[in-house]
Amino acid sequence: MTDNKPLSAEALTNGTVSRPPTKTAAEIAAEHDLLPKLIPHLDRHLIFPLLEFLSGEEVDDSEILKAKYELLKQTNMTDYVAALWQKMNDSDEVPEEFRKKREEVLQRLSLFQEETTKIDELLGDESVTSNLRSDKVANLKFLEQTHGVTTEMVDMLYDFGRFQYSCGDYGNAAHLLDQFRILSTDNDKASSATWGKLASDILTTNWEVVMEEVNKVKESIDTKLFNNPLAQLKHRTWLIHWALFPFFNYETARDLLSDLFFSPAFINTIQTDCPWILRYLAAAVITNRSRTRNTGQYQRQLKDLVRVVRQEGYEYNDPVTEFVKALFIDFDFEEAQKKLGEAEEVLKGDFFLSATADAFVEAARHLISESYCKIHQRIDIKYALFPFGSHLYSMMHWLIVSQRPLRAPRPQPRRGREVDCKPDQRYAHGRQTRLSRGNGADESPCEFGLSAGH
């Protein structure tokens, strides 16, 4: 039976207490790697950038090569797949199967181009498109009577778009699938084409168009699948994962997608089917602190985030969500600081969040200091320095600037450097701040503690 007796003071002072070994940054990132959870909800072409990201990390290159090969060998990217095979087998020769498949792909490409030339030219003619209306049936009838366009010719656009996508020609794939949607009356194929165009636009990093397609997919899920809740759940899960690409690569999308993810239908999907998305939602909300000008909206999102993290703590947690829990639920500042260090390593090892790691850490440090000041009436300023790891006067400058909208009372003489944080009756969420300088204070950063006078 485990001995649960409290540790003696002698054991603590002599350092004889056994402590768990400290994990390295690579071990922390590997332990909380979400790639196995993300892959089932992404198209194989969208998975490829995630594998490319791993190539720059401390991962066995041979394993990455093998994963790329297995991922793409079923596509029409024959030249690239052949090159991967050569690297894997350290060979200059290309197997006959790759040469044969390459010839087949080129033959099919030539056939598709021949079959779709007429309808492609018609849809590019302004004199023709100006006569098209919102009624797809009427449009198809008009083109059939005046230009001999058939349903088979329209479907050929869809097949050619899928073929180009499989070849890795995402720009032409997006163009063909968009043309197909203009004329097709097949709802299932039109929905599939919308998903294909969304993936193509993501892979060409055309973020403005990506956001338009995200909205189209969302509307399709809400309207065409309203009588099938299970299908809605599945499709929303896919959309959430695909939307991570613009979420952290397109600044304008951050607020729009945050609102979408916090909407009742999508937050329920996250809680039900993919709770690991809370990492990305938490990172977005915390980094939004320094971006958003709408304080009310930010506070609502932060409140919703804390609520969901509290509810889903039994289902999913990682250093990012544990930081939120420590700071806003447990008010454990020492634990929050510890989890922030781990969260930084997790973010640096995450494909979607690596570029926001520094912004996240900076915003999180400010939140620690703000929360600490809100619940203490008086603190020694040295206890607020540790989260920033900055010079004393830099910290003082930040406190002064952050409190500028409030009127501070006239300072009274007091020994040491202190910050008094007391509620101001004139401001519901305000506080008065006083900075005073005295003797014997050290300017170097010191440990964050809770021993200040309360």
Image (cartoon, rainbow, N blue to C red):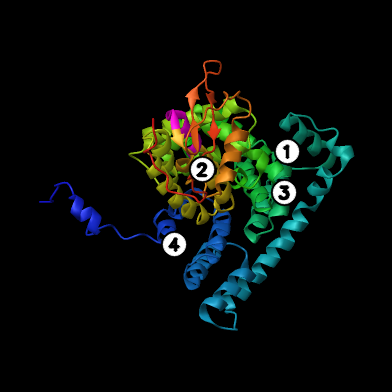
- Relative image position of residue 282 (x, y in whole percent): 49, 40
Crowding near pointer 4: few (<14 within 10 Å), some, many (20+)? some
Cα distance between the residues tagged 1 and 2: 50 Å
Mark 3, secondary structure of its residue:
helix
Cα distance between the residues tagged 2 and 3: 48 Å
Amino acid type of the residue tagged 2 in the rendering: Arg
- Vertical placement of residue 299 versus 40, above or below: above
Amino acid type of the residue tagged 3 in the rendering: Leu
Mark 4, secondary structure of its residue:
helix
Nearer the observer: mark 1 or 2; the answer is: 2
Nearer the observer: mark 4 or 3; the answer is: 4
Residue highlighted by disc 1: 182
Mark 4 or mark 1: whose residue is earlier in sequence: 4
Q: Is residue 56 visible?
A: yes
Mark 4 or mark 2: whose residue is earlier in sequence: 4
The residue nearer to you, when weighing 202 against 323, is: 323
> Mark 3 and mark 2 in contact (Cβ < 8 Å)?
no
Amino acid type of the residue tagged 1 in the rendering: Ile
Crowding near pointer 1: few (<14 within 10 Å), some, many (20+)? some
Residue highlighted by disc 4: 26
Cα distance between the residues tagged 4 and 2: 23 Å
Nearer the observer: mark 4 or 2; the answer is: 2
> Mark 1 and mark 4 in contact (Cβ < 8 Å)?
no
Nearer the observer: mark 4 or 1; the answer is: 4
Residue highlighted by disc 2: 365
The residue nearer to you, when weighing 419 against 142, is: 419
Mark 2 or mark 3: whose residue is earlier in sequence: 3
Tell whether 195 sits left or right of 381. Answer: right
Q: What are the residue bounds of the magenta stretch?
A: 368-378
Residue 26 counted in the magenta span: no
Q: Residue furthest bottom?
A: 92
Which numbered dot is residue 176? 3
